[in-house]
Amino acid sequence: MSGGRLPALVLLLLAAAMLAASTLPVEASVGYDHKALIIDGRRRILISGSIHYPRSTPDMWPDLIQKAKDGGLDVIQSYVFWNGHEPSQGQFYFGGNYDLVRFVKLVKEAGLYVHLRIGPYACAEWNFGYFFFFFFFFFFFFFFFFKLFPCNLLIFRTDNGPFKAAMESFTTKIVSMMKAEGLFQTQGGPIILCQIENEYGPVEFYGGAPAVRYTNWAAQMAVGLSTGIPWVMCKQDDAPDPVNSGLAGPVPYRPAEDIAYAVAKFIQKGGSFINYYMYHGGTNFGRTSGGPFIATSYDYDAPIDEYGLLRQPKWGHLRDLHKAIKLCEPALVSADPTVTKLGNSQEAHVFRSNSGACAAFLANNDPSSAVRVTFNGFPYDLPAWSISVLPDCKTVTFNTAKVAAPTSQIKMSWFEGFSFKSYTEDISSLDSSSFTKDGLIEQLSLTWDKSDYLWYTTYIDISPNEHFLKTGKWPYLTVMSAGHAMQVFVNGQKFGFVYGDVDNPKITYSGNVKMWQGSNKISILSVSVGLQNIGNHFETWNVGVLGPIGTHGEHLNLHTASGSSSVKWGDAAKDQPFTWYQAYFNAPSGNEPLALDMSSMGKGQIWINGQGIGRYWPANKASGICRSCDYRGNYNEKKCLSNCGEPSQKWYHVPRSWLNPTGNYLVVFEELGGDPSGISLVKRTAK
């Protein structure tokens, strides 16, 4: 399950009614029935939250996990990031913030369970949906080389031999790693659920018989790995038994009262497993954000914010809800609810066990009016659009609309600015590390996603008889691109910058350009902003103008301290496109989270000590209609918006673990032109 394209908090709801009878062996310690997951013979109401290990740093993991536990979570859910673990075919990486085993062991040490969503496709606004880019090379080669032939050599996510072989190989590797470390619950570990594939239902709808065969194959392959725990699918209504399916949907910037109402409503209907997507969203470091046009921040308005601080009152309000639900657990797992009408829009859901446990949920589904209802002979006041939880069927311990948790005040405090030096790219230069290729070649087939940038260059000879040389009316140039952004230069002079958006990444530049008699050089810098991560056959979607790869500075590794000595740096200039800026700074004292304020810049990338902070684009302003948000009533993704007219993202997370006490090397590559004197390091606090 992915979130939406806008950051938000959502729920993965695994309904008890959707769980089929278990076919697991009797010795398994994790099973399920029509009511709930059964762990060590006990039905459980489980509260889960998504924390993606690569979107934070290992030094942050223990605190994030503890805050999740303190917030009432039982389970930590995470995808497994295929292209992070296998950046090239057969070459695996499980270090740094990709240390999956370490992350799972930390969850175990905290006494929580793990839901591991192996996929290996995930979507999740991650570059290429977690598929490793080697796939794209094979697809591109076979599609364009054999396009005259009816072949099916490599097609993603269908009944295709090469793809299934690669998918099975990676899934098997992850399962084997977890087994070797004793991390499945049947081995005494924390992993109680695994997921195969992701959000495949809509794809299967259009994929026909091959897609149906693929679904069944994926389920059989996963179950055949003998983990001893259940497997689930997401958005897969026809998931083959014993693989079960979850429901998912994105909900941007949802108020705490409405989130609590949605969770309580699900539980009162008999649900037994919920997941918050995200509980901590984190950061898309480097070039990992996909979409395209997804921001570096993956904050998601989650209970724990991007920097690891509590977002109040959301975190505290949900914590109190979780406590109330846990008090109801003996009754909730014992019986289906009895529903009684208390009014036109009011009802009671009552759970009773044979041992005498009783729990009730009193709901007022009216979005505008508070009411007083009578239940079991006693009056209860219910605010509009709220649910009261009565763990003993008498006493209200929680109401979703009554927030008792304090509201945190987030502050970004200026710490220091930087003394930059700069180096400006020569847009006409080629060096020994560059290579060229004739023709209009699809961008990714040349860059292999190692760079966002590709130059397209051509020359036009203008004869002395051209009419425009006499009239002064410049010729009209049109350039079409499959996306995502491009800058157009003629004879070194910039004439335009155009970019697409999520709904329409294809772009066209049209305008008059100045040319002279003789040879004229047209240079087009094509820029990708993350790869597609969702959609039918998204592997076929192109980028670029249908040249040498990247920028001169990338070839020279100017983002590293060792590569910086290869050019002569000068005084920092303002409003210069294609300019590299460098500065050194010392780490600030304290333990507050840190960020860079990039609001004075246009668009580009940031590195600290050679590690990618990510893409920045504050010149892109958020559009929409921001108004006061009322939690009452049905929610939609446009209901609660903020930041209209402001940069889509202003602050960029700097992990403290990436810093040395002194001499940290900061590099900024600016594509459009900005004022580096406005860049500053800030501290984030919440009170």
Image: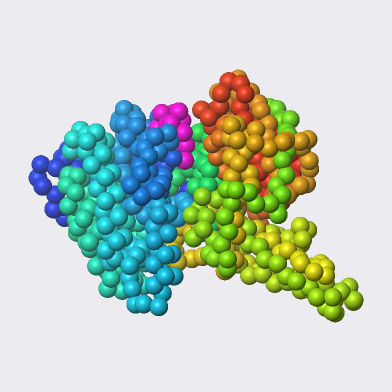
Question: From the viewer's perspective, is 462 left or right of 123?
Answer: right
Question: Which image quadrant: the C terminus?
Answer: top right
Position of 457 relative to 92 (above/below)? below
Q: Is residue 128 magenta?
A: no
Question: From the viewer's perspective, is 30 left or right of 4?
Answer: left
Specify the segment rendered in magenta: 55-65
Name which quarter of the figure residue 486 lies in. Answer: bottom right
Measured as percent of width and height from the top left, residue 113 is found at 29, 37
Measured as percent of width and height from the top left, residue 88 is found at 39, 48
* Residue 348 visible within the image: no
Question: From the viewer's perspective, is 350 left or right of 514?
Answer: left
The residue at the point 9 percent across, 45 percent down is 26
Q: Considering depth in this image, is 374 or 296 the residue closer to the camera? A: 296
The residue at the point 24 percent across, 67 percent down is 213
Q: Is residue 57 magenta?
A: yes
Question: From the viewer's perspective, is 36 left or right of 578?
Answer: left
